[in-house]
Image (spheres, rainbow, N blue to C red):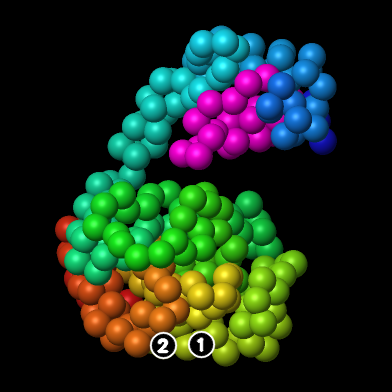
Amino acid sequence: MPRTHATVEAAVRVLELFDADHSEWTLSELARHLGQPTSTLHEQLGTLAAAGLLVRVGRGRYRLGWRLLKLSSALYGSLPWYAPAHDAMERLARGTHLLAFLCVLHSHTDEHSQILCVARSVQGRDGPPVAGELDFELPAHATASGKLLLALAGRPLPRPAPAFTPQTLTTPEAWAAETRAIRTGGYALSRDEWASGTSGLAVPLRGEGGTVLAALGLSLPTARLGSSDGLLRALHGAAAEVGWTLGHRGQK
C-alpha cells in the first residue's frame, strides 16, 4: 500500500472510532484500542487537530472538530434527495414507532460493495434495541437495505458472505432466488439474518427516471413482522412522496 494511502487510511480509522458512545478519547485509550505506539498516534492526532478534524479538550482528551460539520453540510447539500428523504424517514419513525433509516450503495468495484447507513431517525421510536442501531456500514447480504440495493443494482452475492445466523443467505443459488423476489416485489425483507430477534424491511427511493438513489428502511423486533403489510404500505407511501418531490412519476 502506498505510504500516502496508508496515512489516509490510518487517519480514517482514528476518526471512525468517535461516535455517540465514544465522543471523546485520550491518546493512551486510542493507542490501546488500535494497537499502535503512542508516539506514532500522537503525531496523527496532532495532524488531525491542526487540520480542524479533531479538537483537544481538557486533560488530553480529543473529540471531533467542527470542520467535519462543514464537510458534512457540504456533502448533504450536494444531494438534492437527502432533505426530503430525511424528512420522510423521520415521519415514518414517528408513525410506526420504529427505527427508520436511509442507506446507500457505495461501490469500489462490482465485486466490492458497501452498504452505508447515512441517516437514522432520532425520535418516534420505542421498544427494545435492535441490531445495527449505531453501525455506519451494514452487512450487504444480511440486511433488508443491503439486499434491496444489491439486487436492484444487479450485484452478485458479496464474497465473503459470512453466516451471522442460521437464516443468513450465503449461497449464490439462494441469492439468485432472493434477487428475483426483490425485483418482482419492489421491497426487501430480512428475518433474523443479521441477529436473531431483529428483522428489517426496505423499499427504494427513486429519483427522476426511476434511478435508485437510496433505501428507506425500518428495523424492528422479529415479533412485529406480523404487521409487515401495514409497515410496507407506510414505507411505500413515504418513498412515493419523496419520489414525487424528485420528479419520479411511476414504477420502474
Instruction: Tell me where residue 2 sits by quadrant.
Output: top right
Give the amino acid type for the residue marked by disc 2 in the picture.
Answer: Thr
Image coordinates for residue 83, horizontal then vertical, percent: 25, 47
| Residue 49 left/right relative to 98 | right
Q: Which residue is mark 2?
A: 184
Image coordinates for residue 34, horizontal then vertical, percent: 74, 33
Give the amino acid type for the residue marked by disc 1 in the picture.
Answer: Arg
The disc label shown at residue 18, or none: none
Q: Nearer the viewer, residue 221 or 213?
A: 221
Contact flag, marks 1 and 2 (Cβ < 8 Å): yes
**Residue at image location 41% in from the left, 88% down from the top:** 184
Label 1: which secondary element:
helix
| Residue 54 left/right relative to 34 | left
Image coordinates for residue 156, horizontal then vertical, percent: 64, 73
Q: State how far apart marks 1 and 2 are (Cα).
A: 6 Å
Q: Quadrant of the N terminus?
A: top right
**Quick check: can you spot residue 106?**
no
Image coordinates for residue 65, horizontal then vertical, percent: 46, 20
**Residue at image location 33% in from the left, 44% down from the top:** 79
Q: Which residues are magenta?
A: 4-27
Label 2: which secondary element:
helix
Magenta stretch encompasses residue 245: no
Q: Nearer the viewer, residue 154 or 63?
A: 63
Q: Which residue is mark 1?
A: 180
**Residue at image location 46% in from the left, 64% down from the top:** 130
**Residue at image location 44% in from the left, 61% down from the top:** 129
**Quick check: can you spot residue 176?**
yes
The answer to whether residue 38 is above or below residue 243 is above
